[in-house]
Image (cartoon, rainbow, N blue to C red):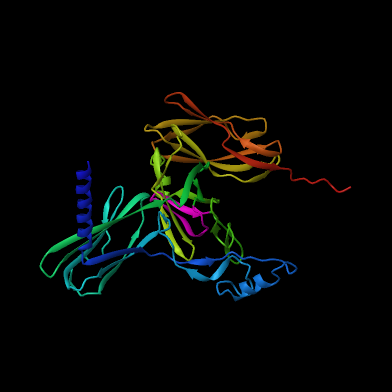
Amino acid sequence: MQVKGQASAADKMEVNQAKQEHLLALKVMRLTKPTLFTNMPVTCEDRDLPGDLFVRLMKDDPSTVKGAETLILGEMLTLPQNFGNIFLGETFSSYISVHNDSNQVVKDILVKADLQTSSQRLNLSASNSAVSELKPECCIDDVIHHEVKEIGTHILVCAVSYTTQTGEKLYFRKFFKFQVLKPLDVKTKFYNAETDEVFLEAQIQNITTSPMFMEKVSLEPSLMYNVTELNSVSSSSESESTFGRMSYLQPLDTRQYLYCLKPKPEFAEKAGVIKGVTVIGKLDIVWKTNLGERGRLQTSQLQRMAPGYGDVRLSLELIPDTVSLEEPFDITCKITNCSERTMDLVLEMCNTRSVHWCGVSGRQLGKLTPNASLSIPLKLLSSVQGLQSISGLRLTDTFLKRTYEYDDIAQVCVVCPYTSPES
């Protein structure tokens, strides 16, 4: 056992000696923005034993803010003391330097930098051509940049190959391992309106330990939709964000963004097109942290399951928000054949306790081919005040003797137009 131990120690010495024989030295440093210097102010009352000693010391300290010496943040900047955190969507920058520590001229120096992720290996070197020679005490410098698009373990592999004066070709490499963290938690919800409009709510949470400035949060719609952002309030002079002028997101804070998507006319006219799973679009999020470090995330294509309308869809094209008590008002219904067969439809109107239809019930609407639509103006009145639901429409397909019932189609606010005289 003792002989074996001596042999292994000799092997280790040979390995270390082999490492020392390299004529070039490789240094890799991450490039990040500096941070504001922080200090811990110490104060006391004037009647205490130190008197104004602490105050005079803080005033003489060059790192404190003049006139506000008790603030923790100072006016100076400090360079990063460690590797720090790298978040998804940020740009990873690194400085690579190869220095000739020997007294010999080295030839054919090739520096290569690769980034290994869980799914791919990327070449980050600005140039793949070799440097003809490197004199003693000279160096080769390079700066690499990469927009991080994957979370998890990343390995930066830096390899150096060169040729000595004797013609010997040498090669060595170093590995730098780091983790990429998730900066934001994004959740989406879809809400289907009575019309073809779709409302998207995006909940964005800052899961880092520092505040973020949300520069842009937008929705890039798919080819089927037009989008309207509902995250600002328009006034006579300008449009102001609902989150205020300072769009900061503190750690663990959540913010909701709302968007309205409406099918383009060429798709809305074809009822059978918007069925099943449809692609809505993707979110584009841009933020800044600390001293302007920029990050950007794009979600994958957001998908939603289109609501099923059955064979016949009934929607409202025109309806008033507020109507008067016991006075007729007009609505416009749109009937769409969502099936693959022709229908012969009959419209029936059934009165409810508060809503009464005006007109002839049981009239023939005629034949409706697949994916075709028909607009029908109707008249009704309400006998009860308050928020009333419109119900009681029935469509019957005379071919299959099948009846489709439509209740709670929409709601209107019924008010009394008469005001009582003042006593």
Expressed as whole percent of the image width and height from the top left, the position of residue 259 reads 50, 51
Quick check: is 174 in the magenta stretch?
Answer: no
Number of numbered labels in the structure image: 0
Asked whether residue 129 appears in the rendered view, the answer is no
Left-right relation of 421 to 243: right
- Quarter of the image containing the N terminus? top left
Region of the chain picked out in magenta, as a range: 208-229
Expressed as whole percent of the image width and height from the top left, the position of residue 55 reads 66, 72
Judging depth in this view, the residue of 282 and 70 nearest the camera is 70
Vertical placement of 13 versus 139: above or below? above
Asked whether residue 300 appears in the rendered view, the answer is yes
Expressed as whole percent of the image width and height from the top left, the position of residue 378 reads 57, 39
Judged from this view, the residue extending furthest toward the top is 401
Expressed as whole percent of the image width and height from the top left, the position of residue 88 reads 40, 54
Vertical placement of 197 versus 134: above or below? above
Query: What residue lies at 52% left-to-right and 67% top-to-bottom?
Result: 37
Judging depth in this view, the residue of 176 and 16 nearest the camera is 16
**Prevailing SS of the magenta stretch:** strand
Query: What residue lies at 63% left-to-right and 67% top-to-bottom?
Result: 70
Judged from this view, the residue extending furthest toward the right is 423
Left-right relation of 412 to 289: right
Judging depth in this view, the residue of 200 and 260 nearest the camera is 200
Judged from this view, the residue extending furthest toward the front is 2
